[in-house]
Image (cartoon, rainbow, N blue to C red):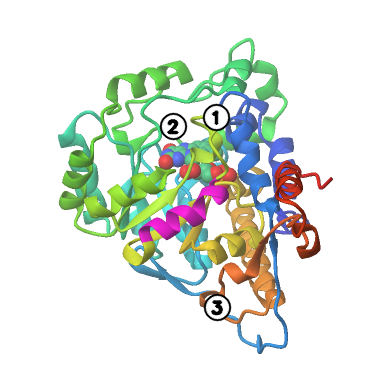
């Protein structure tokens, strides 16, 4: 923990993960699709919104508790599902799930995890959700859901934005293979990280136990697994069948429009996860924070709304909650902690984000997250009132300039 203790924010953890992981693995985590426009925009999008404090409030005791997908969390964060965590550190999904429970946040286990539904069920008493990639074999889908019920999972989420694999050019360049295999293009990158190699080799066999371990091979094999086994025709009728079979709290992950969110509510989902897969699928879609308010307004109190993508600070969580999110999800932040220091790194990442969230609330003048509202947010570089009083043409010009980040 001592070394992780020298990291003071998520950017520090990203730098350490870059130093410690073989290049292909760091780039697999950090990268996005195509030009990575959406991956970057997810993070930068938060800067478009300023916080507006209101002081002289009693903030001696701050409560961040919130019920999310049927379980009360100590603070409103859910760790996003990410495949193959064991590649980044031998503590893998088991270590991450333990740290999530310890910190009082939710954990999501991916279909493509390197730990089984049953093992996570045994070690975690905290809130846990299973993330389902729909396979084109309904019996296999139902079998995974039955395993989740037996293992005591609290919620299920269905990811719908992966019907076609995203184009991740960093992985093509680094020659990443799964499980890692030395090839001429990656040999040097792995040889330069002997500590990682030792950890990987001492961590037991690599497998994907939730899909029967069948998806080993290089990323192109994984892509061909996706191409042959993934359901490319996910219909609302199939969503309804999954919800019925599961019978518990259910979220759809990858929703990006008010229309789809309304349809999700009609299908019987309890939550939508507003997500673009961290910019790893369709590049060029807007940052999730920009579409949150519309979607939250469209579903009202019929569903929970979880904001996923770009969370790197507690203030980001607070902005999302103020705009109408029930909770937030984060993926790369904890993977950087895991890659840099294993489970103790994840612990420190969660402690930092929690402290930042609490501090931001106090500095905003809120003792409870329920007090947050859109009054706490303004558009960054919002045009001062006196400038808004100009002629319509002049106002339109000012609005245009401020939307591209430059006041005239
Ligand atoms: C390395 C990595 C693996 C991922 N694997 C999955 C997955 O198996 N299933 C899934 O629904 N999303 C997956 N995601 C997407 C995350 O769940 C989440 O949407 C994304 O990381 C959010 O963006 P953030 O990293 O900026 O927090 C993965 C993301 C990363 C970085």
> Magenta residues: mostly which secondary structure?
helix
Whichever of callouts 1 and 3 sits on the residue coming sooner in the sequence is 1
Identify which residue is drawn at 21% across, 50% down: 243
Picture layout, residue 390 above or below residue 397: below
- Identify the residue under disc 2: 206
Q: Which residues are magenta?
A: 288-299
Whole-angstrom CA distance, mark 2 to mark 1, is 30 Å
- Identify the residue under disc 3: 371
In the picture provided, is 1 more to the left or to the right than 278? right
Indicate the secondary structure of the residue bearing disc 3: helix
Picture layout, residue 36 above or below residue 97: above
In the picture provided, is 276 more to the left or to the right than 50? left
Whole-angstrom CA distance, mark 3 to mark 2, is 46 Å
- Identify the residue under disc 1: 283
- As for residue 296 lying within the magenta part, the answer is yes
Q: Is residue 285 visible?
A: yes
């Amino acid at each position: 923990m001592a070394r992780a203790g020298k990291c003071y924010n998520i950017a520090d953890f990203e730098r350490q993960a870059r130093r410690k992981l073989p290049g292909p693995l760091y780039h697999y985590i950090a990268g996005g699709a195509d030009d990575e426009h959406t991956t970057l925009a997810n993070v930068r999008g938060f800067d478009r919104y300023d916080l507006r404090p209101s002081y002289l409030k009693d903030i001696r005791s701050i409560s961040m508790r919130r019920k999310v997908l049927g379980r009360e969390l100590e603070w409103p964060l859910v760790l996003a599902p990410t495949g193959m965590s064991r590649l980044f550190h031998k503590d893998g999904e088991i270590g991450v799930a333990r740290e999530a429970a310890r910190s009082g946040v939710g954990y999501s286990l991916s279909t493509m995890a390197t730990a089984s539904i049953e093992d996570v069920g045994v070690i975690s008493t905290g809130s846990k959700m299973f993330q389902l990639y729909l396979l084109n074999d309904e019996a296999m889908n139902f079998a995974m859901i039955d395993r989740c019920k037996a293992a005591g999972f609290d919620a299920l989420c269905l990811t719908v934005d992966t019907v076609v694999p995203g184009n991740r050019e960093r992985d093509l360049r680094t020659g990443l293979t799964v499980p890692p295999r030395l090839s001429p293009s990656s040999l040097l990158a792995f040889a330069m990280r002997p500590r990682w190699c030792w950890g990987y080799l001492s961590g037991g066999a690599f497998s994907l136990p939730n899909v029967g371990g069948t998806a080993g091979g290089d990323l192109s094999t994984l892509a061909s697994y996706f191409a042959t086994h993934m359901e490319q025709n996910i219909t609302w009728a199939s969503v309804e069948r999954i919800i019925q079979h599961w019978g518990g709290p259910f979220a759809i992950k990858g929703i990006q429009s008010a229309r789809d969110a309304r349809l999700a509510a009609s299908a019987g989902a309890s939550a939508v996860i507003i997500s673009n897969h961290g910019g790893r699928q369709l590049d060029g879609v807007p940052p999730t924070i920009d579409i949150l308010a519309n979607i939250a307004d469209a579903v009202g109190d019929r569903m929970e709304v979880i904001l996923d993508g770009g969370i790197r600070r507690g203030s980001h969580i607070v902005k999302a909650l103020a705009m109408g999110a029930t909770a937030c999800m984060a993926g790369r932040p904890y993977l950087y902690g895991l890659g840099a220091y294993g489970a103790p790194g994840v612990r420190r990442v969660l402690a930092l984000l929690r402290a930042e969230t609490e501090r931001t609330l106090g500095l905003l003048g809120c003792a409870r997250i329920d007090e947050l509202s859109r009054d706490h947010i303004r558009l960054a570089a919002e045009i001062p009132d006196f400038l808004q009083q100009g002629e319509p043409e002049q106002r339109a010009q000012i609005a245009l300039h401020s939307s591209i980040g430059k006041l005239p």
